[in-house]
């Protein structure tokens, strides 16, 4: 049986600072496919992964530090390529602002036959409000980006992170 990584039971996207002193770098194994190319991976400033928290390179970290200082935690990572080569220049971004923007009165319930205690809603509707001055936040495992942050992504030409108007069962109410 393989030894479990020390970070395996850490839950990211919970809106809080994580104690990472004992876990070391978080390791990601790249599957052997057409995208398993070091040069291709390095063309992206933000990388998706199976944790759902983006990885950021130096360019993306500079943007985050300028636009959202104190709103995230950068955690060391190792991206292990199929041939064993390790990319170490990306950091996992753990957003530490937690907000409550879901409007439960407007959210759409699941049909009663499918409704469970942990899965009550077919669609969660969010307000776009973030605390004054905040640019990044997380709620119900969904990243929320301010308009200011979205504009900065475009201005700085940072690739790989898109702030959508929806994410799975989560939708944003019109302003």
Image: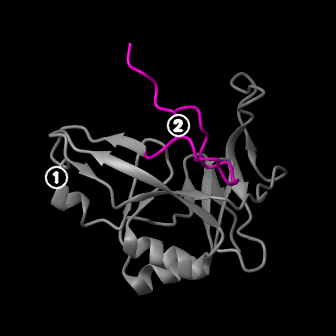
Q: Residue furthest bottom?
A: 155
Q: Dot 2 corresponds to which residue?
A: 7
**Residue 37 tag number:** 1
SS under mark 2: loop
Q: Is residue 25 above or below residue 68?
A: above
Question: Mark 2 and mark 1: span between their CA atoms?
Answer: 26 Å
9 within the magenta span: yes
Q: Indicate the secondary structure of the residue bearing disc 1.
A: loop
30 or 80, nearer to the observer: 80
Q: How many marks?
A: 2
Give how far across and how far down residue 58 sits, in percent.
38, 71
Q: Residue at x 63, y 56 (%)?
A: 171
Q: Nearer the viewer, mark 2 or mark 1?
A: 2
Q: Locate the C terminus and report the quarter of the image it occupies.
A: bottom right
Residue 68, compared with residue 164, is above or below; it is: below
Q: Residue at x 72, y 59 (%)?
A: 126
Ranked by sequence position, the earlier of labels 2 and 1 is: 2
Specify the principal SS of the magenta part. loop
Q: Residues within 10 Å of mark 2 (few under 14, many from 20)?
A: some
Place of residue 155 in the rendered image (x, y in percent of width and height, measured from the top left):
43, 87
Q: Position of residue 39 (x, y in %)?
A: 16, 61
């Amino acid at each position: 049986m393989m030894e479990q990584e020390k970070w395996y039971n850490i839950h990211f996207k919970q809106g809080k600072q994580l104690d990472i002193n004992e876990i070391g770098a978080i390791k990601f194994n790249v599957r052997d496919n057409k995208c398993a190319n070091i040069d291709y991976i390095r063309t992206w400033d933000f990388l998706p992964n199976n944790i759902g928290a983006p990885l950021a390179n130096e360019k993306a970290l500079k943007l985050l530090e300028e636009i959202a200082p104190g709103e995230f935690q950068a955690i060391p990572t190792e991206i292990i390529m199929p041939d064993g080569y390790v990319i170490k220049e990306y950091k996992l971004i753990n957003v530490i602002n937690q907000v409550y923007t879901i409007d439960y009165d407007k959210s759409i319930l699941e049909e009663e036959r499918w409704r469970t205690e942990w899965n009550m809603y077919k669609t969660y509707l969010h307000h776009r409000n973030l605390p004054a001055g905040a640019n990044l936040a997380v709620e119900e495992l969904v990243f929320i980006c301010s308009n200011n942050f979205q504009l900065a992504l475009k201005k700085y030409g940072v690739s790989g992170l898109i702030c959508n108007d929806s994410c799975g069962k989560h939708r944003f109410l019109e302003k």
